[in-house]
Image (cartoon, grey):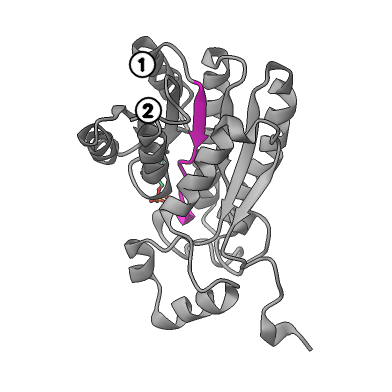
């Protein structure tokens, strides 16, 4: 295998499933040694095993990204084996504390749901950056996973949307603080990625509404997001920093037709 990340060390959080798993696999396929970090040991191990089965190099790391000590230890473990971290993809997140719709009404919102969402989605990204920056060589790259929920309002998951919006500000701060070292930091903002689990969670009517919102006839897959993340982490994006790249098949680029007079 050879590619854009030959000889590089990458760390991907939330890599036990979904977008994170696809990004870890993509970075490994293009030559990176990958730290596959997730709260769920089984998920991290499965992603790492799949990478190794294809001839890549991966280390599974069990860690809660919201815990300062655990993040410090996970980064240290990776660095002990691989020496440094050239690429960070901070992607671990929770949506409504795992229960869809639990923060639908603000009047009855359980503050524990709000706090846990902020802890994982926002503090988790900050802790990953905090502990990775000291072991990242100049010229390294970071990508934070945000969401279209950061850019437009919705009647559900206010905590999630607020946490993902805060990440966009944090992205610009990280880009500003470490730009002189050639360290870049960008955010990706995907729309709902159609995984089998997402398709099962939505009704046919909800899926039809989602499709009607897209300009393109197809939804984004986890591999589409991985392509964008790999580009942003590569030298091809050497002049991009502090940016948010929306990947949504054209959902936010227009007003829905029923809204046009
Ligand atoms: P998506 O479809 O957007 O990729 P997933 O729920 O499949 O969303 O992925 C989020 C990943 O983040 C999961 O693998 C989950 O276990 C992981 N995760 C959630 N909370 C934490 C946490 N506190 N620390 C580390 N990983 C976490």
Q: Which mark is residue 92?
A: none
Could you classify mark 1 by the number of other residues whose Cα lies within 10 Å: few (under 14), some (14-19), or many (20 or more)? Answer: some
The image quarter in which residue 29 lies = top left
Q: Which mark is residue 34?
A: 2
- Residue 173 x %, y %: 72, 31
Element at label 2 = strand
Element at label 1 = helix
- Look at 40% across and 27% down and name the residue there: 32
Task: Look at the image and say whether residue 87 sits in the magenta stretch.
Answer: yes
For disc 1, the marked residue is 77
Residue range corresponding to the magenta coloring: 86-97
For this orientation, the residue located farthest to the right is 261
Q: In the figure, is residue 173 to the left or right of 72?
A: right
- Residue 193 x %, y %: 46, 60
Instruction: Dividing the image into four quarters, tell me where ligand 1 lies.
Output: top left
For this orientation, the residue located farthest to the bottom is 261
2, above or below 94, in the image: above
- Look at 42% across and 41% down and name the residue there: 23
For this orientation, the residue located farthest to the front is 2
The image quarter in which residue 250 lies = bottom right
Which of the two marks, 2 or 1, is nearer to us in this view? 2
Mark earlier in primary sequence (2, 1): 2
- Look at 45% across and 76% down and name the residue there: 207
- Residue 150 x %, y %: 64, 54
Q: If the image is split into quadrants, where does the C terminus sit?
A: bottom right
248, above or below 228, in the image: below
Q: Is residue 93 visible?
A: yes
Q: In the figure, is residue 146 to the left or right of 45?
A: right
């Amino acid at each position: 295998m050879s590619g854009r990340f030959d000889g590089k060390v990458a760390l991907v959080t939330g890599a036990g499933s979904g977008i994170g798993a696809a990004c870890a696999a993509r970075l490994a396929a293009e030559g990176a040694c990958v730290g596959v970090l997730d709260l769920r040991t089984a998920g991290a191990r499965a992603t790492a095993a799949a990478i190794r089965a294809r001839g890549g190099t991966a280390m599974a790391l069990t860690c809660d990204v919201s815990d300062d000590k655990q993040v410090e230890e996970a980064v240290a473990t990776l660095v002990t084996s691989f020496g440094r971290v050239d690429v960070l993809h901070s992607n671990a997140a929770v949506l409504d504390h795992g229960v869809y719709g639990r923060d639908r009404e603000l009047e009855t919102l359980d503050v524990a749901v709000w706090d846990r969402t902020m802890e994982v989605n926002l503090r988790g990204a900050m802790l990953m950056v905090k502990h990775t920056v000291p072991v990242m060589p100049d010229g390294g790259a970071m990508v934070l996973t945000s969401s279209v929920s950061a850019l437009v309002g919705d009647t559900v998951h206010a905590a999630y949307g607020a946490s993902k919006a805060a990440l966009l500000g944090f992205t610009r701060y990280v880009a500003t603080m470490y730009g002189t070292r050639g360290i870049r930091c960008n955010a990706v903002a995907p729309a709902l990625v159609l995984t089998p689990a997402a398709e099962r969670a939505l009704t046919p009517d909800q899926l039809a509404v989602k499709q009607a919102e897209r300009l393109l006839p197809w939804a984004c897959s986890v591999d589409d997001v991985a392509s964008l993340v790999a580009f942003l982490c590569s030298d091809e994006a050497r002049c991009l920093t502090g940016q948010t790249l929306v990947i949504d098949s054209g959902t936010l680029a227009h007003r829905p037709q029923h809204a046009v007079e």
